[in-house]
Image (cartoon, rainbow, N blue to C red):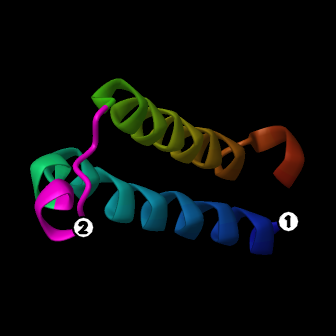
Amino acid sequence: MKFAKIIFTVAGIWGVLTLTPLYFTFNLIGQKDPPPITHPAFFYGFIGAALAWQIVFFIIATDRHAIGP
């Protein structure tokens, strides 16, 4: 179970590090890769949902019942 704890922790850290900068690249995406984003609610909603799953990964990694005594 220690392997699973490490994997979920690394996945959570990796996800936070890769998803957080997307909050600040909204205008840059429209400039570098046209057409610009026309529905920002969908863009920010996807990033928010993906970051919520990173929190779930951290919760799974720290679950005491799955690891044992």
Query: Is residue 5 toward the left or the right of residue 46 in the image?
Result: right
Locate residue 67, reporting x and y percent: 83, 53
Residue that carries the numbered disc 2 in the rendered image: 33
- In the rendered image, the quadrant that contains the N terminus is bottom right
Locate residue 52, reporting x and y percent: 51, 35
Question: Which amino acid lies under the numbered mark 2 shown in the image of this protein?
Answer: Asp
Residue 31 numbered tag: none
Task: Give the residue at x 36% y 65%.
Answer: 18
Tag in front: 2 or 1:
2
Q: Which SS class for mark 2?
A: loop
Query: Is residue 2 toward the left or the right of residue 54 in the image?
Result: right
- Residue 1 appears in the figure: yes
Instruction: Indicate whether 18 appears above or below 43.
Output: below
Q: Is residue 31 magenta?
A: yes
Locate residue 43, reporting x and y percent: 37, 38
Magenta segment boundaries in residue numbering? 29-38
Residue that carries the numbered disc 1 in the rendered image: 1
Task: Give the residue at x 62% y 39%.
Answer: 56
Q: Nearer the viewer, residue 5 or 31?
A: 31
Work out whether mark 2 precedes mark 1 in sequence or the reverse, and give the earlier one: 1
Q: Which SS class for mark 1?
A: loop
Question: Which amino acid lies under the numbered mark 1 shown in the image of this protein?
Answer: Met
Instruction: Indicate whether 9 appears above or below 7.
Output: above
